[in-house]
Image (cartoon, helix red, strand yellow):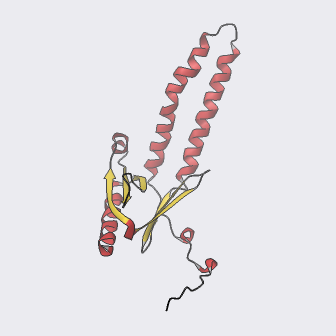
Amino acid sequence: MMTNQTIDVPQLPSVESSSFQKHPKRFLNKKLIAKTLLFIPLLATVVVPFFAVEEEPWIWKVALVLWLVLLLLTIFMAYKEYFVRGYVLREHDITYRKGWLFHHQTTVPFNRIQHTEINHGPIDRMFTLCELEIFTAGGSSSDLSISGLDPVDAQKLKEYISSKTSTYA
């Protein structure tokens, strides 16, 4: 005989009540420096040419102010977003959240994980950071990427996830 019990949604445990692990502070530094460096070519290609416009000297000032406002807004958003990022390991899954304006939260159950990878880009190596990618069956790209991890923590996470996935196999 099959049963189908009713579940009271308010009684379900909330992932939000879990304690999310934060990224190291050097991840914030990396993000702020990367965002600032992104705006240098924009300054050179968009704002600097307006200096040559002699008949309308105010144009370069407006372009410079717009560039500065965009830079400050981008840095502010990267700063605010840092404090939202985090991951939590639970008994049967891992959850990662990010995004300040646009919230994004991904939960991957351990029984769906195929394999994990740790990647170190050149900028990540400068800041002693890495990225943990988690792959589930059926896809060629990662289903969950946690960037900005300390390499020791990433290795521990990878080993923990591998041990959990082996129990489901």
Give coordinates of residue 143: x percent, y percent.
42, 56
The quadrant the C terminus occupies is bottom left
Residue 93 figure quarter: bottom left
Give coordinates of residue 23: x percent, y percent.
45, 55
Up the image or down, 104 lies above or below 54; here it is: below
169 left or right of 35 in image = left
Viewer-nearest residue: 26 or 147: 147
74 left or right of 111 in image = right
Residue reaching furthest to the bottom: 1
Give coordinates of residue 86: x percent, y percent.
49, 59
Q: Residue at x 61, y 28 (%)?
A: 67
108 left or right of 84 in image = left
Up the image or down, 119 lies above or below 52; here it is: below
Give coordinates of residue 32: x percent, y percent.
50, 41
Residue reaching furthest to the front: 1
Viewer-nearest residue: 145 or 64: 145
